[in-house]
Image (cartoon, rainbow, N blue to C red):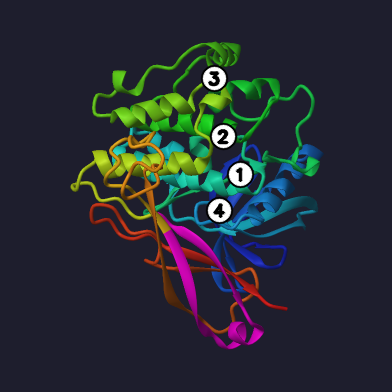
């Protein structure tokens, strides 16, 4: 492929952004809707590669979340007599986390910001019954004010069509794989173990285990990683404890879900980083149903938004010290839920399934940080 080519007669290729064993990624222009996009082109051959590529497009395209890359289109074409498959995604103004880590460890505010985004993305995927199976730095894109999870090509779900593995084939990246995955047993908390590996690397600048080949597998199965505070003294004890829980060998000893991880991380930021470290509020998601007239001509619709913040009376982060019902401000969970209704204007011409971004209407920032954004998925009544 060359710059200037029109893929499938539509997507005008502008410049190549990257390449790998799968093929190429290009910056392109879609004249049909006049927007810049990223086009991932599969140039290899083999049924398994095409199956994985199609699976990635199908899974990511069905997930609507601000911390998961948006897929616009998927198709096949012929170029110079050779068949190829392609996927069209949103063009992200950022860089892979792996590129940032090439310069060493990150600041703690940045670590927390990125990890919260990944936790939220995993919660959305898990709510849809999907296990990502390959959370690693190269599959996390870091943008100026958020981070997004990409590459759902080896995702597994409850539907057998989600599974494209073959007997005897190791699926995932061993440096970030949970112990149970080496025997082919993937579950939601396997993704959380991988997030723990990524968190460890962001904090200290290296992976929890650095063996080679089967030595690396043995480390994940049998060896305990170092504690964060033994490698970096400014790490809050609560973050040290959380990463230790995420890297537990037994899935039952890990946090229960991505939402729990994100909530704990937010609490760590609130209580340990101080006013000198503003933290941007989390992006929130919501849904709204419009009539056909409202969608066609525009409307102002009341929308209820719910956000959480750490209870000021509960100092503990992993377990609220008052216990259930013992706190005057919360139910003992350590979190206070706040809801309010606002009036939101939807422009004329919105389509069924379209996601609208409401800038600054997400969760409030911490320590003077900017508020997050609200992403509203529109449903149009038939």
Say few, some or many: other residues with alpha carbon within 10 Å of mark 4 (under 14 / 14 to 19 / 20 or more): many
Residue that carries the numbered disc 2 in the rendered image:
191
Q: Is residue 207 above or below residue 263?
A: above
Query: Could you tell me if the residues under marks 4 and 3 are in contact, i.e. CB atoms within 8 Å?
Result: no
**Marks 2 and 1 in Cβ contact (< 8 Å):** yes
Disc 2/disc 1 C-alpha distance (Å):
9 Å
Q: Earlier in the sequence, mark 4 or mark 3?
A: 4
How many angstroms separate mark 2 from mark 3 (CA)? 13 Å
Residue 14 lies, in percent from the top left, at: 55, 60
Q: Residues within 10 Å of mark 1 (few under 14, many from 20)?
A: some
Residue linked to disc 1: 126
Q: Which residues are magenta?
A: 282-306
Label 2 or label 1, whichever lies nearer to me, is: 1
**What is the magenta segment's predominant secondary structure?**
strand
> Sequence order check: which comes first, mark 1 or mark 4?
4
Residue 237: in magenta span: no
As drawn, the label of residue 69 is: 4
Where residue 255 sits in the image (x, y, percent)? 50, 33
The answer to whether residue 283 is left or right of residue 239 is right
Specify which label sits upstream in the sequence, 2 or 1: 1
Viewer-nearest of discs 1 and 4: 1
Kindly state the secondary structure of the residue where label 4 is placed.
loop
Circle 3 sits on which residue? Answer: 249
3D distance between C-alphas at marks 3 and 1: 20 Å
Q: Quadrant of residue 77?
A: bottom right
How many numbered dots are placed on residues in this image?
4
State which mark lies toward you, 2 or 3. 3
The reply to whether dot 4 and dot 2 touch (C-beta < 8 Å) is: no
């Amino acid at each position: 492929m060359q710059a200037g080519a029109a893929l499938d007669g539509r997507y005008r290729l502008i410049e190549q952004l990257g390449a790998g064993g799968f093929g190429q990624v290009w910056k392109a222009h879609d004249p049909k809707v006049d927007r810049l996009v990223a086009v991932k082109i599969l140039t290899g051959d083999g049924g398994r590669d095409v199956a994985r590529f199609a699976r990635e497009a199908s899974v990511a395209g069905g997930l609507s979340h601000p911390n998961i890359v948006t897929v616009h289109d998927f198709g096949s074409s012929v170029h110079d007599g050779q068949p190829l498959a392609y996927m069209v995604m949103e063009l992200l103004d950022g860089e892979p986390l792996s590129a940032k880590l090439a310069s060493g460890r990150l600041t703690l505010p940045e670590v927390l910001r990125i990890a919260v985004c990944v936790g939220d993305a995993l919660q959305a995927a898990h709510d849809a019954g999907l296990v990502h199976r390959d959370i690693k730095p190269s599959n996390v894109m870091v943008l100026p004010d958020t981070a997004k999870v990409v590459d759902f090509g080896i995702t597994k779900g409850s539907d057998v069509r989600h599974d494209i593995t073959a007997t005897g084939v190791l699926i995932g990246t061993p440096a970030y794989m949970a112990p149970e995955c080496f025997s082919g047993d993937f579950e939601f908390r396997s993704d959380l173990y991988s997030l723990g590996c990524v968190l460890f690397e962001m904090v200290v600048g290296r992976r929890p285990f650095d063996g080679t080949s089967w030595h690396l597998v043995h480390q994940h199965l049998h060896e305990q990683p170092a504690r964060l505070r033994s490698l970096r003294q400014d790490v809050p004890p609560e973050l040290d404890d959380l990463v230790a829980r995420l890297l537990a060998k037994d899935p039952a000893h890990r946090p229960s879900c991505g939402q729990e991880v994100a909530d704990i991380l937010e609490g760590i930021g609130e209580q340990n980083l101080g006013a000198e470290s503003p933290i941007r509020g989390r992006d929130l998601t919501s849904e709204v149903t419009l009539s056909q007239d409202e969608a066609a001509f525009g409307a102002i619709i009341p929308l209820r938004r719910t956000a959480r913040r750490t209870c000021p009376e509960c100092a503990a982060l992993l377990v609220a010290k008052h216990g259930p019902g013992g706190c005057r401000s919360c139910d003992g969970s350590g979190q206070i839920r706040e809801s309010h209704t606002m009036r939101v204007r939807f422009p004329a011409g919105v389509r069924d399934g379209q996601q609208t971004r409401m800038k600054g209407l997400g969760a409030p920032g911490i320590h003077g940080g900017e508020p997050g954004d609200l992403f509203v998925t529109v449903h149009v009544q038939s």
